[in-house]
């Protein structure tokens, strides 16, 4: 089994108080790419917002990409009281109305990155349900969860694809959130219980990579 | 005598090269332009890019609102409000930073600084700047998107016939790569 390697890239160091940008080897993304290599003309959803790197990589492999910034939508809908606001039904509904508004079985794959760990129940379960709905049968999504059990704040990153197993993680300014819950393998299996399979990848950098297949 | 001399001079004015057709009769809503102009923009701060102004270009200033269809046979810059459709086949369309566009857009090349809600179709290239906001689907051969730009929608890269990689963004578009511009007079039609 491969372990993720974290390497500092000083040139990308952000402002004070933010973690540095890092490049990392991602076994989960490597697995995701094996599907991308096997077929052409797939529809892929990237939930990290639009970026040149991701667009060029996905379209360069002959696929179609859709971009959606799920963390941006969360910030817009829930504002400063991020966790508490998710419990307000009207705000939660507003978030669901703006996110994943795609037809059923529209995508062959989804790059969700680390967005799901910012959601609390029951909005988290609703969002997972929506993700599975927009995926085609046998379609897969790549999801990251912070695996540092002691961390109280979770940094949120933008993920830029460098190659078929390397990602550049750039911290999103102003997006360090208080942890709502810790996700271990058991809780993730429960969260994705309606999926056909859930595969975990161990890393050394406090990131749990998960491939969920519908 | 005065009038005779003027009549002799008048036919020499157009001096078109051989083979270039005379401009068609212009409808009343069609405007011919040789120089960059704005239809209305008293305090405009955004200027169209220099290369686009060479072969004739039109601009809708930030205080202009258009509802309907716009067809341009020249480069066009929109910095105002547009609702409907915009077509600049074979030419460059620039959406300025003050623009609020709710329209489907079609052009050879589209540069976006402002806000668009609608599908965008560029035969050659789309350039989305960091301050841009685009909600809609994109169809193009090449795309350049700056970090910080807001985009929600899908991207469909049409394969280039020559077989070269379609997605690779060119840092500086080569003027030679652009299709030859039509010798027909530059004009913009607003319906």
Image (spheres, coloured by chain):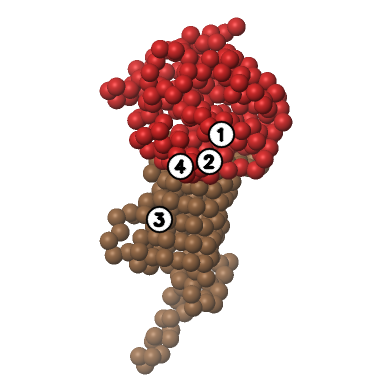
Chain colours: A red, B brown
| Residue under the image location 68 percent in, 20 percent down | A197
Q: Distance between the residues labelled 2 and 4?
A: 9 Å
Q: Distance between the residues labelled 4 and 1?
A: 14 Å
Chain to which the residue tagged by mark 4 belongs: A
The foreground one among A91 and B155 is A91
Residue that badge 2 annotates: A96
Q: How far apart are marks 1 and 2 (CA)?
A: 7 Å
**Residue A127: mark:** 1
Chain to which the residue tagged by mark 1 belongs: A
The local crowd at label 1, few if under 14, some if 14 to 19, many if 20 or more residues have their Cα within 10 Å, is: some
Residue that badge 4 annotates: A91
Tag 2, which secondary structure? helix
The foreground one among A106 and A97 is A97
Q: Do the residues labelled 3 and 1 touch (CB within 8 Å)?
A: no
Work out whether residue A8 can be spotted: yes
Residue that badge 3 annotates: B99
């Amino acid at each position: 089994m491969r372990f993720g390697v974290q390497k500092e890239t000083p040139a990308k160091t952000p402002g004070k108080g933010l973690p540095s940008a890092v490049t990392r080897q991602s076994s989960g993304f490597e697995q995701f790419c094996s599907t991308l290599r096997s077929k052409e003309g797939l529809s892929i959803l990237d939930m990290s917002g639009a970026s040149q790197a991701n667009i060029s990589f996905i379209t360069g492999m002959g696929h179609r990409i859709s971009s959606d910034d799920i963390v941006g939508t969360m910030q817009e809908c829930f504002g400063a009281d991020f966790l508490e606001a998710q419990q307000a039904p009207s705000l939660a509904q507003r978030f669901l109305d703006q996110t994943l508004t795609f037809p059923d079985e529209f995508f062959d794959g989804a790059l969700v990155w680390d967005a799901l760990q910012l959601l609390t129940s029951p909005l988290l379960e609703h969002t997972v349900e929506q993700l599975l709905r927009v995926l085609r049968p046998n379609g897969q999504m790549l999801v990251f969860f912070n695996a540092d059990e002691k961390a109280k704040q979770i940094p949120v990153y933008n993920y830029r694809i460098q190659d078929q197993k390397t990602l550049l993680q750039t911290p999103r300014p102003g997006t360090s959130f208080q942890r709502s819950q810790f996700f271990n393998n058991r809780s993730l299996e429960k969260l994705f219980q309606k999926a056909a399979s859930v595969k975990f990848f161990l890393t050394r950098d406090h990131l749990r990579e998960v491939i969920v297949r519908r | 005598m005065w009038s005779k001399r003027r009549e002799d001079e008048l036919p020499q004015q157009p001096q078109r090269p051989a083979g270039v057709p005379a401009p068609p009769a212009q409808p009343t809503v069609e405007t011919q332009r040789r120089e960059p102009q704005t239809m209305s923009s008293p305090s405009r701060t955004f200027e169209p890019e220099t290369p686009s102004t060479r072969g004739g270009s039109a601009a809708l200033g930030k205080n202009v609102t258009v509802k309907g269809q716009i067809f341009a046979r020249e480069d066009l810059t929109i910095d105002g409000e547009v609702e409907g459709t915009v077509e600049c086949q074979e030419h460059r369309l620039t959406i300025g930073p003050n623009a609020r566009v709710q329209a489907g857009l079609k052009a050879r090349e589209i540069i976006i600084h402002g806000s668009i809600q609608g599908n965008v179709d560029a035969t050659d290239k789309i350039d989305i700047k960091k301050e841009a906001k685009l909600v809609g689907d994109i169809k193009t051969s090449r795309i350049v998107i700056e970090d910080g730009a807001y985009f929600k929608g899908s991207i469909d890269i049409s394969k280039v016939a020559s077989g070269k990689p379609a997605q690779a963004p060119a840092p500086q578009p080569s003027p030679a790569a652009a299709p030859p511009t039509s010798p027909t007079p530059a004009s913009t039609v607003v319906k």
